[in-house]
Every structure is written in structure tokens, then in C-alpha cells.
Image (cartoon, rainbow, N blue to C red):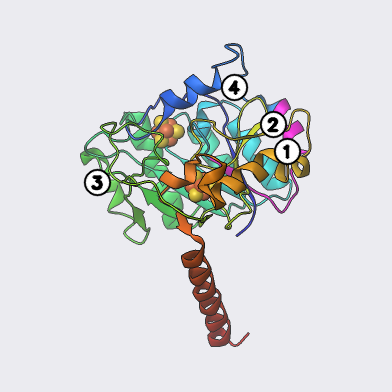
């Protein structure tokens, strides 16, 4: 799996979905400094990107809908035209038709849509503007100009988008909701939790075992350890004054790894995370994944 950085274009997502730990993230982000940078500026973004190697995949997702930052389209263009592999995960909120037409011209790796559901789990406003853009995005998929990789919906489709969604039955639909390693209180719309603390030596199936190189970039240059760390328990440091390599193998990550391997070093998020796995089981699953890859290559005659 490639190394990844998920770009948080601003702190505080006004969509405020029921299953999203916005409150916790904001409390922790501003806990020691109320004046901390809220919005990622294009200038700072370019400065941080200058420190990120080209083999690191850039994902527009993070702790906020990316297009709640007006400079998001420029940021995406900068990454895609600059040689990084780029993924987009968006609700379309804040995106204008002009933005969509610009990103349609780029070479993107993943384009994932998060859409409105009938129960209001994702509190995406279903306005005329939203419906018009959603239709255009669906047309873009059908025409092959910007294929939608998958659709995320937390329940059934909102009644007002059902007809539009029916036009693209070929796109995979993902419906799970997770509690972000216990970062949401029960009753906040969560459907999947880890009921008991996981014991023993754990590996991360999302972040390459112990590589832990799927990090969130926050607006002030800080990097979090992983996509579940909405409580900002483990900050690797900041691209403001350190290099990516320094942060990647710094003390914070090493301490986190020790806690994953043994509870005697202290509590760690992974013990409540749905993607952590006991080391033995992880090795077995890696072995079978490797075998599958080899089998696929043999079948393809490579
Ligand atoms: S759109 Fe994404 S970041 Fe914003 S509240 Fe919903 S899940 Fe959270
Ligand atoms: S909490 Fe641990 S297991 Fe879960 S995603 Fe983060 S590093 Fe991986």
C-alpha cells in the first residue's frame, strides 16, 4: 500500500454528520491555542506539499469536506499536475459546477462520492443546487469523463436522489458506519463499534502493519498518526518546521508502535479500532493477499 496524506482543508465541517467526531476534533485542536490556524491557505498548502515526496498519495478528505475551502480546486490541480497520485472523497457541498468541470480535466486515481441518506446520518443539504451538481457528476461518470470509484451512503439513498443514483447501478455502494476507534460517544449515530478492548500485539491493516503512513495533514501543518485519530492523541509533529522524513520516523510514531505491540507501554487507539488485527492473524492475511496477487499475475500471463 502506498504512503498517504489526507488533506484537511479546514477545521470544522459545517455538514456535521451524525457519525462524525467533529466536536471531539475541534475541542482537541483548539485546546491549547484558540487562535490555531482554521483554514489551510493555498500558500501554506504549496509549502507543505513541497516537503511531501511524489510517491505519497494525496487524498482530499481529512477532517472536513474538502470544498468547504474555496481554494480546494487549486489545491487539487496543484497536486494532480505536480505528479502526485490524487484521490478525492467529497459530498459536493461547497463545490461549484465550474470546480467540477476543472477537476474533470485532471487525471484522478479515486473519485468517491458521499451522498445524502434518507435517515439524515450524513446531514448533506439536499438543495436544488446540490441535485443539479449531483446530476452533472453522474452524467460525467456515464460519459467516462470522471468515473465515480464508489459511493458512500449511510443507510438508504435520500428519496430525492434515488432516481439519479439509479442511473449508475455499476458503481459500488458502501454503507458501513464506524465509530472511529471509539472517538464517538454511543448514541451519536454509530452503528459499528469494537465492543471490547483488543488485547495482545496489534497490527494496523489500514496503515501497512507498523508503517503508519496514512496521515492527516491539519491546516497548521500538523500530521496525525492515522485516519482514526480524531481526538489528536498522536501528533507526529508539523511540516511547518520539520521534514516529512523526520516526522515519518520520529519519536511519536515509535512510541505509538510500542503501545500497539504491548499494552504495558500504555493505552493506544488501536485497541478500540475496527481495522487493527492481532499480529499472527495479520501475517496470515498478508500471506494470502500475496498469494492472490501472484495468482492474478500468473492468470494474466505476466
Ligand atoms: S462531510 Fe465528512 S468531514 Fe464533514 S461532517 Fe460529514 S463525515 Fe465529517
Ligand atoms: S487506530 Fe491503530 S489500527 Fe486503527 S487506523 Fe489507526 S493505527 Fe490503524
Q: Mark 4, residues whose alpha carbon is within 10 Å: few (<14), some, or many (≥20)?
A: some
**For the magenta stretch, what is the residue range?**
43-60
Q: Quadrant of ligand 1?
A: top left
Position of the N terminus by quadrant = bottom right
Q: Nearer the viewer, residue 81 or 102?
A: 81
Q: Say if the magenta span includes residue 99.
A: no
Residue 140, percent across and down?
A: 46, 50
Residue 122, percent across and down?
A: 32, 35
Q: Mark 3, residues whose alpha carbon is within 10 Å: few (<14), some, or many (≥20)?
A: some
Q: Is residue 221 above or below residue 105?
A: above
Q: Earlier in the sequence, mark 3 or mark 1?
A: 1
Q: Which residue is mark 1?
A: 49
Asked if the residue under mark 1 is in contact with the one under mark 3, i.e. CB atoms within 8 Å, the reply is no
Q: Earlier in the sequence, mark 4 or mark 1?
A: 4
Asked if the residue under mark 1 is in contact with the one under mark 4, i.e. CB atoms within 8 Å, the reply is no
Q: Secondary structure at mark 1?
A: helix
Where residue 39 is drawn, which disc sits there? Answer: 4
Q: Earlier in the sequence, mark 3 or mark 2?
A: 2
From mark 1 to mark 2, how far is it between C-alphas?
6 Å
Q: Which residue is mark 3?
A: 162
Q: Secondary structure at mark 3?
A: helix
Position of the C terminus by quadrant = bottom right
Asked if the residue under mark 2 is in contact with the one under mark 1, i.e. CB atoms within 8 Å, the reply is yes
Amino acid at each position: 500500500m502506498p504512503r498517504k496524506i489526507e488533506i484537511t482543508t479546514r477545521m470544522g465541517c459545517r455538514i456535521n454528520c451524525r457519525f462524525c467526531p467533529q466536536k471531539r476534533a475541534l475541542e482537541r485542536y483548539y485546546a491549547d491555542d484558540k487562535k490555531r490556524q482554521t483554514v489551510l491557505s493555498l500558500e501554506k498548502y504549496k509549502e507543505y506539499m513541497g516537503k511531501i515526496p511524489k510517491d505519497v498519495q494525496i487524498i482530499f478528505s481529512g477532517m472536513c469536506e474538502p470544498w468547504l475551502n474555496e481554494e480546494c480546486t487549486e489545491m487539487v490541480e496543484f497536486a494532480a499536475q505536480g505528479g502526485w497520485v490524487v484521490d478525492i472523497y467529497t459530498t459536493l457541498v461547497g463545490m461549484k459546477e465550474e470546480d467540477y468541470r476543472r477537476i474533470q480535466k485532471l487525471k484522478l486515481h479515486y473519485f468517491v462520492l458521499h451522498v445524502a441518506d434518507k435517515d439524515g446520518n450524513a446531514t448533506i443539504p439536499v438543495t436544488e443546487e446540490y441535485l443539479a451538481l449531483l446530476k452533472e457528476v453522474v452524467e460525467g461518470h456515464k460519459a467516462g469523463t470522471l468515473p465515480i470509484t464508489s459511493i458512500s451512503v449511510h443507510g438508504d439513498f435520500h428519496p430525492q436522489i434515488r432516481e439519479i443514483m439509479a442511473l449508475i447501478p455499476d458503481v459500488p455502494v458502501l454503507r458501513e458506519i464506524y465509530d472511529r476507534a471509539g472517538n464517538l460517544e454511543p448514541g451519536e449515530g454509530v452503528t459499528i463499534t469494537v465492543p471490547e478492548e483488543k488485547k495482545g500485539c496489534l497490527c494496523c491493516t489500514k496503515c501497512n502493519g507498523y508503517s503508519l503512513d496514512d496521515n492527516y495533514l491539519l491546516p497548521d501543518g500538523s500530521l496525525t498518526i492515522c485516519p482514526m485519530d480524531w481526538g489528536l492523541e498522536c501528533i507526529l509533529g508539523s511540516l511547518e518546521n520539520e521534514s516529512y522524513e523526520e516526522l515519518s520516523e520520529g519519536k511519536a510514531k515509535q512510541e505509538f508502535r510500542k503501545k500497539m505491540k504491548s499494552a504495558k507501554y500504555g493505552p493506544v487507539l488501536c485497541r478500540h479500532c475496527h481495522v487493527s488485527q492481532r499480529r499472527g492473524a495479520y501475517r496470515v492475511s498478508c500471506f494470502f493477499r500475496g498469494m492472490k496477487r501472484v495468482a492474478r499475475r500468473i492468470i494474466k500471463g505476466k
